[in-house]
Image: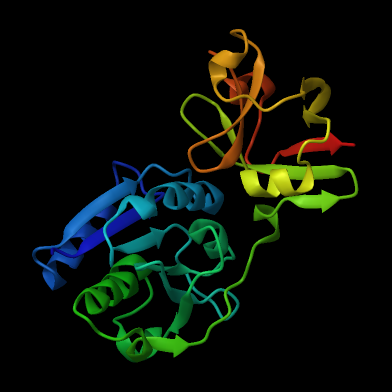
Amino acid sequence: MKPSISIISDWKQRDYYYAALRQRIRQYLPDADVNSISNQVESHDLMEAAFMLRAAWNYFPDNSIHLMCVKTEASAEHPHVLIRHKNQYFIGTDFGYWPFICKTKPDAAWILNDEAHYKGNSFPSLNVFAPVAAAIAKGVSPDELGETGYALQEAAELKPVMEKGILRAGIVYFDSYGNAITNLNKSGFEQEVGDKKFRMFLMSEQNRIHRISSAYCDVRPGSLVAVFNSQGLLEIAINEGNLKQLLNLRTGDALRIEYE
């Protein structure tokens, strides 16, 4: 089977970066199937990129390799990492988003040994990620590429905050319709709220929701609606409207859920 490699980045159409990376990969792997998950992520927006990769990776074949090309510069605090999870590989920088991307604690992680193995760090996607991806595709053991047993970080903003009678979720992504997707998954909601009566508030008490719907059309056009989407994450929207524009929302804004 051809090596399957995905790229997600905040590069834009006018830039040469994606074309250069794609061709570098094919220098190493001439028959590679290189796919773009998106090259239109908002600049430096790791949260948006993390959601997109989370939503897409499990549709790829086993042993696919995913390159996270947003905020790629490494430091002692945020090293380059190689991750293996559910027969998939991920390469990027550790800013604490990998447990969210993988939907659970990843199976294994390695700190990449940039200096020992690769050509430089001025364009990490090209000079670090591409040769690592090629090595993995050719069957090189991850233990030869970095230090095993690395404990991945976990960003606080990607975890709902649970208090007695209150659950606070954060918006992690807006789709092209302006629907807001949060970091609260269905199992977390059911565990904390269950069958209790609840009220959801978005930005103000005027914007409230009292139930989870199964589809947008469960409410009238122009009304707020809450659903669990195909990723199992709580999504807030306006039926036939653009929630993001109407309420001037941004990623990181909070949804408060009160329950009894």
Q: Which residue lies furthest to the left in this view?
A: 30
Q: Is residue 134 above or below residue 222?
A: below
How far from the left and from the top, in percent, is residue 173? Answer: 55, 40
Residue 184 seen: no
Q: Which residue is drawn at the image coordinates 72% and 25% (left, top)?
A: 211
Q: Is residue 118 left or right of residue 104?
A: left
**Toward which corner of the image does residue 178 lie, by quadrant?**
top right
Residue 4 seen: yes
Q: Which residue is drawn at the image coordinates 12% and 69% (left, top)?
A: 27
Q: Where the N terminus falls, by quadrant?
A: bottom left
Closer to us: 260 or 89: 260
Q: Is residue 192 left or right of residue 149?
A: right
Q: In this view, does 203 lie to the left or right of 38?
A: right
How far from the left and from the top, in percent, is residue 259? Answer: 86, 36
Q: Is residue 29 above or below residue 198?
A: below
Q: In this view, does 9 lie above or below 144?
A: above
Q: Which residue is drawn at the image coordinates 78% and 51% (left, top)?
A: 161
Count of numbered circles on the image: 0
Q: Which of the colour schemes (rainbow, by chain, secondary structure, one colour) is used?
A: rainbow
Q: Is residue 71 above or below residue 112?
A: above
How far from the left and from the top, in percent, is residue 104? Answer: 55, 62
Q: Which residue is drawn at the image coordinates 30% and 83% (left, top)?
A: 118
Q: Where the C terminus falls, by quadrant?
A: top right
Closer to us: 72 or 92: 92
How far from the left and from the top, in percent, is residue 13? Answer: 29, 41
**Toward which corner of the image does residue 174 lie, by quadrant?**
top right
